[in-house]
Image (cartoon, helix red, strand yellow):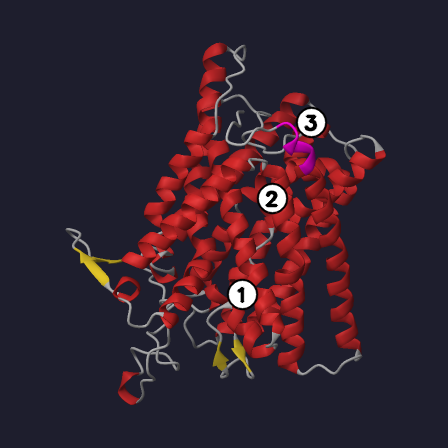
Amino acid sequence: MTNIHHHQALNISPPPQHHGGDNGVFDDDGRPKRTGNVWTASAHIITAVIGSGVLSLAWAIAQLGWVAGPTMMVVFSAVTYFTANLLAVCYRSGDSVNGKRNYTYMDAVRNNLGGFKVKLCGLVQYGNLFGIAIGYTIAASISMMAVKRSNCFHKSGGKNPCHMNSNPYMISFGVVEILLSQIPDFDQLWWLSTVAAVMSFTYSTIGLVLGVIQVAVNGKIKGSLTGVNTGTTEKVWNSFQALGDIAFAYSFSMILIEIQDTIRAPPSEVKTMKKASTLSVAVTTIFYILCGCMGYAAFGDLAPSNLLTGFGFYNPYWLIDIANVAIVVHLSGSYQVICQPLFSFIEKSVSNRFLDSQFVEKHIKIPIPGFRSFKLNLFRLVWRTMFVILTTLIAMLLPFFNDIVGLLGAMGFWPLTVYFPIEMYIAQKRIPKWSPRWITLQIVSMICLVISIAAAAGSVAGIIHDAKSVKPFHTSY
């Protein structure tokens, strides 16, 4: 995967159509030839999916128990796979092989559903991406501190509680993201996706191996069929929040169309995307079930909310350090992949409104020895920097990893992973109202809506509970 370059997935506006002899250079819409394939699309999906969500799965399974926990993970996996395939069909409007391309998720909603639903989709999608950027900032800072704390624990033999403030770590992650955010778009992110995907496998595997070792040391599998036994009310809220955590772990639908727009044809983009979805959802589900179940088997009801930073594991401390460094590197890349649609949307909107503005349109060429010169755009520099600063400040205000993860998963899961893909598919395929197929799709949608509302309620209850004990900007671990 070293030599793969993605097409510029998120151009500001389509260039004029090209015909005839340009076939080898341009696609049917006049844009530069797309070069993505099953492997690059899978790398993008795995980068977006196997994120910090995997770390809270042991806690989630602990709340639900050995029966409901793995069952719900399989259910979420099946729903995600099913709706990802429906969404892949909607990449082209009218005809899924030769129809008009939709470059973004919002374009697909606009061309298939139109009206108020486009604004609703934009609000939910970009709000969710904004929230995920905050979640990633929290998770990365926790992992940076975990490296420092594991070394501190090791030196003191576990006697020193090793408390530290999270702010410097959040700020340093923000500085890195300001630099990386100047990479213009998906076509230049392929290398970052590849590195991030490798890192996600690294820390997930370490978490899995440590879980297996811990089970061997314990000499038994911990946990119970029904999960943590707390008071009835707390049990209900925690179980709901656990559903949100699992939903968050599977969220990638909001960037699926953008990823599909990097794929070359023939074969048709929908065929390639379905293969990529099958491969990546299968890989992530196996990983998730293994990581979540081994974490629960190792720690039972005491499974930490973040497997590699909740200090379920202290030794070997150097292996914990490698895992947490891998998390930070992965989240650095994931932050960019996740934010790209949001960056593009704002830049496209501003560019269309201020066509003659030098500040918005002008690119300054910066020569880089041994590489192509880098095109720096002043508006992009200012706006993306402000965006990263804002997400960092909010992360410093609300540093509750588990609650935020659950709330984001709940808010994004039903509208973006279920409702819009099903509605667009019905419109695209002209499925008659009240036909058996239409009724089945609506039942799936309603069940997922109920689960999402429950998960959101559980996470809000968690945030309210945790907020009582936290001073803004003074969080320590």
Residue 124 location in percent, x, y?
Answer: 59, 60
Q: Which residue is mark 1?
A: 275
State yes or no: discs 3 and 1 in contact (Cβ < 8 Å): no
State yes or no: discs 3 and 2 in contact (Cβ < 8 Å): no
Secondary structure that dominates the magenta span: helix
Please state which amino acid type lies under the numbered disc 2: Val
- Look at discs 2 and 1 and give the one toward the viewer: 2
Q: Nearer the viewer, residue 176 or 247?
A: 176
In the displayed structure image, the side of residue 288 where residue 465 appears, left or right:
right
For residue 115, which quarter of the picture?
bottom right
Residue 450 location in percent, x, y?
Answer: 77, 56
How dense is the environment of label 2, judged by Cα within 10 Å: few (below 14), some, or many (20 and up)? many
Mark nearer the N terminus (3 vs 2)? 3
Please state which amino acid type lies under the numbered disc 1: Lys
Residue visible at 33% across and 53% down in the picture: 382
Residue found at the far right of this picture: 232
Image vertical order of residue 410 relative to residue 66, above or below: below
Specify the label residue 405 is tagged with. Answer: 2
CA separation in Å, label 3 and label 2 = 19 Å
Mark nearer the N terminus (3 vs 1)? 1
Specify the label residue 302 is tagged with. Answer: 3
Please state which amino acid type lies under the numbered disc 3: Leu
Q: Where the C terminus falls, by quadrant?
A: top right
Q: Nearer the viewer, residue 3 or 61?
A: 61
- Look at discs 3 and 2 and give the one toward the viewer: 2
For residue 8, which quarter of the picture?
bottom left
Q: Which range of residues does the magenta coloring cover?
A: 464-469
